[in-house]
Amino acid sequence: MCPLQCNDLKVENSSLTGESEPVECTVEKQSDMVTEAKNFIFNSSLVMNGEARGVVVRTGDRSFIGCIAGLAGQTRQSKSSLEIEVEHGACTPTYLWPCRVYGGGG
């Protein structure tokens, strides 16, 4: 959300930026970097003080958090050592020799 009007608004963005201290929000743009901008409030932000009126500028996958989630979903996991060994072992010919088991008994 981009605030159009703020009244002593402070939000905590720790879930997004890792900052533990509340950030004071303003109506004026102060930075080109979204995570450092004081004129944006994110869905995951926790309002600690004050109030504001604003406009939602992006939702869902187009939001900042949605973009982060999309990037996280694109990561490719490499195979573990066990998976590689199992695949290699599955292609290795295996021979079983018949054997006879003799039981003891009287």
Image: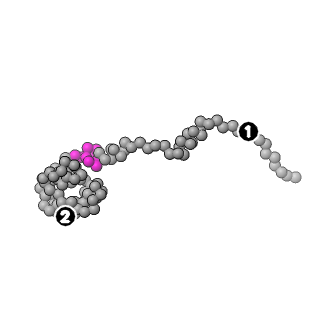
Q: Is residue 80 left or right of residue 41?
A: right
- Residue 69: image location, x then y, percent: 33, 47
Give neighbour class at mark 1: few <14, some 14-19, many 20+ (Cα, 10 Å).
few
Residue at 28% x, 54% y is: 16
Residue at 14% x, 56% y is: 26
80 in relation to 49, above or below: above
What amino acid type is highlighted by mark number 2? Asn
Residue matched to label 1: 97
Magenta stretch, overall SS: helix
Q: Is residue 85 left or right of residue 98?
A: left
Badge 2 marks a residue whose secondary structure is: strand
Q: Nearer the viewer, residue 31 or 77?
A: 31
What amino acid type is highlighted by mark number 1? Trp
Please say whether residue 84 is one of the residues in the magenta stretch.
Answer: no
Q: Is residue 98 left or right of residue 45?
A: right
Residue at 33% x, 44% y is: 71
- Residue 60: image location, x then y, percent: 27, 46
Q: Quadrant of residue 95?
A: top right
Residue matched to label 2: 49
Distance (Cα) linking label 1 and label 2? 77 Å
Please say whether residue 59 is one of the residues in the magenta stretch.
Answer: yes
Residue at 25% x, 53% y is: 43
Magenta residues?
Answer: 58-66
